[in-house]
Amino acid sequence: MNKLILLNGITGFYDSSGNKPPELNRKQVKEDCFSLISGYGGEVLEYQEPCYPMNFYNVIVKLETKQLHLLLNQFYPFMAFAVSDFTQENIRFIDEPRLEQMFSPFYDVLSTRHLLIPLELKEIKGQIVLVNENDLNSAEKSQIAYWKPKNVGSLVFNYWD
């Protein structure tokens, strides 16, 4: 994947109604998660829709003996997988090739290679500036300066308030 990930509004913050990000269809997301996981022989243990301050769907699934999280950004179809014991401050992303193959026709599944790209923040004339290629709005850039996320994954999947 070479496309831009840091799109306007991906964090859930925007500075005017004119640049409000699109949102995924909640009903479709739920249907996709339950049907694809059960079709694979897995089980959805918990389904959480985005709820302030979380900007992503968090679906806990069990596949065979493995339990993990499906994370899906609320605004753009970016999906990732995480271990079951992550915290708000530290989501531990993993690659799960079987799930990637299953979900990739419907969502852009981000690998750890993309999620763990460091965010480059520099101070220029007293302001924190994001160096990574992005289309983020000014409200998001202010949040980045405040929260100082370490990598792309912690920006795309966040608990910022």
Image (cartoon, rainbow, N blue to C red):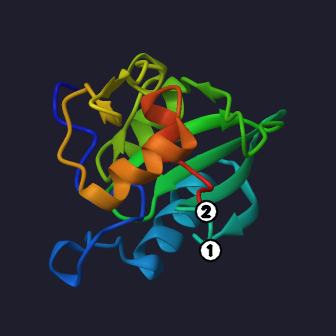
> Residue 138, located in which quarter of the rendered image?
bottom left
Please give left or right for residue 45 compared with residue 50 in the image.
right
Please give left or right for residue 87 compared with residue 38 in the image.
right
Please give left or right for residue 85 compared with residue 44 in the image.
right
Q: Mark number for residue 51?
A: 1
The local crowd at label 1, few if under 14, some if 14 to 19, many if 20 or more residues have their Cα within 10 Å, is: few
Q: Residue at x 66, y 57 (%)?
A: 59
Whole-Å distance between the Cαs marked 2 and 1? 5 Å
Indicate the secondary structure of the residue bearing disc 2.
Answer: loop
Q: Residue at x 54, y 23 (%)?
A: 95
Q: Position of residue 101 (x, y in %)?
A: 40, 34
Question: Looking at the picture, which amino acid does disc 1 mark?
Answer: Cys
Mark 2 and mark 1 in contact? Answer it, CB < 8 Å.
Answer: yes
Please tell me whether residue 88 is drawn above or below residue 13 in the rendered image.
Answer: above
Q: Residue at x 53, y 35 (%)?
A: 148
Please tell me whether residue 52 is drawn above or below residue 10 in the rendered image.
Answer: below
Q: Position of residue 32 (x, y in %)?
A: 46, 64
Q: Position of residue 115 (x, y in %)?
A: 45, 27
> Residue 87, located in which quarter of the rendered image?
top right
Question: Looking at the picture, which amino acid does disc 2 mark?
Answer: Met
In-front residue for pair 59/32: 59
In-front residue for pair 104/83: 83
Image quarter (top left, top right, bottom left or bottom right) of the N terminus: top left
In-front residue for pair 141/31: 141
Q: Residue at x 53, y 72 (%)?
A: 30
Q: Mark number for residue 54?
A: 2
The local crowd at label 2, few if under 14, some if 14 to 19, many if 20 or more residues have their Cα within 10 Å, is: many
